[in-house]
Image: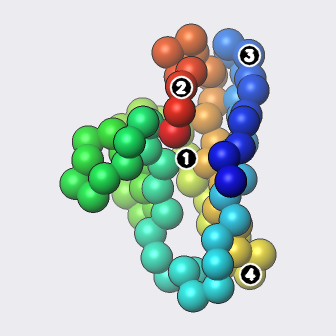
Amino acid sequence: APVTVNGHRGESVDIRCPYESGYESYSKYLCKGECNIGNKNIMVESGSPAKDERFSVTDNKTARVFTITITDLRTDDAGQY
């Protein structure tokens, strides 16, 4: 189900993304807008450097939740991910 996350310019937000058992070893990523394989809208992917260092991803494989953190929020960060 979609999740709404609110934040204020200059602050940071965490986006928690639960996943099903069996996906623990898969890469986790966050796209801005539509997310298609090979799409250049990937903001951050686990195991790879982010396009923008303000985006990071951590994966709690025991709880099966990965968390995207966006720091130093900017107006242009608004939108659908």
In the image, residue 79 sits, relative to residue 36, either above or below, namely above
In whole angstroms, how far apart are the C-alphas of marks 3 and 4? 31 Å
Picture residue at 22% right of the left edge, 54% below the top: 38
* Amino acid tagged 3: His
Give the mark, 3 or 4, whose residue is nearer the N terminus.
3
Q: Which residue is mark 3?
A: 8
Question: Disc 4 marks which amino acid?
Answer: Thr
Vertically, is 49 above or below 81?
A: below
| Residue closer to the observer: 5 or 9 | 5
**SS of the residue at dot 4?**
loop
The span from disc 4 to disc 2 (Cα, nearest Å) is: 30 Å
What x and y, as percent, mark residue 39? Answer: 26, 47
Q: Amino acid at mark 2?
A: Gly
Residue at position x 66%, y 46% in the image: 2
Can residue 49 be seen? no
For mark 4, what is the residue?
62
Query: Spatial distance from mark 1 to mark 3, Cα to Cα?
Result: 18 Å
Q: What secondary structure is found at the residue carrying circle 3?
A: loop
Residue 24 visible in the shown view:
yes
Type of the residue with mark 1: Ser
Task: Determine the image quadrant of residue 5.
Answer: top right
Do labels 4 and 2 touch, CB within 8 Å? no
Label 1 with label 4: CB-CB less than 8 Å: no
Real-space Cα distance between discs 2 and 3? 13 Å
**Residue designated by label 2:** 79
Report which residue position mark 1 lands on. Answer: 56
Q: Secondary structure at mark 2?
A: loop
Foreground: disc 2 or disc 3: 2
Between circles 2 and 1, the one closer to the viewer is 2
